[in-house]
Amino acid sequence: MQYETEPPESIRKMVGENPVVIFTVSTCYLCLAVRGLGVNTTVFELDEEPDGKELEKALMRLSSTVPVVFVGGKLLGSVDRVLASHISGLLVPLLKEAGALWL
């Protein structure tokens, strides 16, 4: 499946206002792993957002699954990508650069 590389304007605005943004659903336990990284995250639960279905469709054009994580306004990916970035040591610099982590 071919994915788009740029999110639509509505999503760009949401992720541009916060250093770390997670788009998920309220029943997703996987986003707890991202929330547990100790950074301030903004979470949009798509099943509780008025335009959640439209947002989910747009996000699915960017990534194969929800939850979808953005750091510093840029798409990082799903939880597996976040955890792989953390294990490889790439996540902390991204979080620092985005202003989400102060060490």
Image (cartoon, helix red, strand yellow):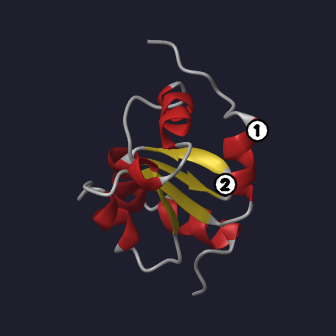
The numbered mark at residue 66 is none
Q: In the visual, does 76 lie left or right of 72?
A: left
Between 77 and 66, the one nearer to me in the picture: 66
Between 88 and 11, the one nearer to me in the picture: 11
Q: Position of residue 41 (x, y in %)?
A: 52, 70
Report the amino acid beneath label 1. Answer: Glu
Cα–Cα gap, marks 1 and 2: 10 Å
Q: Quadrant of the C terminus?
A: bottom right
Read off the residue under disc 2: 15
Q: Position of residue 53 (x, y in %)?
A: 48, 36
Q: Residue at x 61, y 74 (%)?
A: 100
Q: In the visual, does 20 lie left or right of 26?
A: right
Q: Position of residue 40 (x, y in %)?
A: 53, 77
Tell me if residue 14 comes above or below residue 34 in the rendering.
above
Neighbours of disc 2 within 10 Å: few (<14), some (14-19), many (20+): many
Read off the residue under disc 1: 9
Among the 4 quarters of the image, the one containing residue 27 = bottom left
